[in-house]
Amino acid sequence: MKTSKLDIAEYLDSKEMIAEYLNAILEEGDNSDVITAIGHIAKSIGMKKIAEETGLSRPSLYKSLSEGSKPQFETIMKVLRAIGGEIRIDPISA
């Protein structure tokens, strides 16, 4: 039996789905998981569009958002803004 690799980007087809996916990764994943998830989201929206909005090149985006990469915080912030997200801090209740 032949199987194919799941491409999560195919399922990120609404702002709500993107937000749920990223929030789940933020709660349960590590740094690498979050970067990879942001890459999946950027891919679902379109790397060309993200590149235009961030001023970064497509190859640079692919490299920065690939598994195991360690992009600069500035890059992450640019991409988050381009995908329509933001970072928000809420106090943790005891």
Image: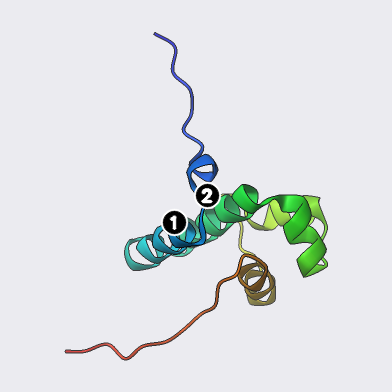
Q: Amino acid at mark 1?
A: Met
* Residue position for label 1: 17
| Location of mark 2 (residue) | 13
> How far across and how far down the image is residue 23, in percent?
39, 66
Q: Amino acid at mark 2?
A: Asp
Residue nearest the observer in this picture, 68 or 7: 7
Labels 2 and 1 touching (C-beta < 8 A)? yes
Residue 8 rendering spot, x and y as whole percentages: 48, 42
Q: Which residue is drawn at the image coordinates 44% and 12% (left, top)?
A: 2
Identify the residue shown where x is 69% and y is 73%.
78
Quadrant in the rendering for residue 29: bottom left
Outermost residue, left direction?
A: 94
- Quadrant hosting residue 64: bottom right
Question: Dot 1: what SS?
Answer: helix
Residue occupying the point 73% across, 60% down = 50
* Left or right of 55, for residue 20: left
Q: Mark 1 Cα within 10 Å, few/some/many (few <14, many 20+)?
A: few
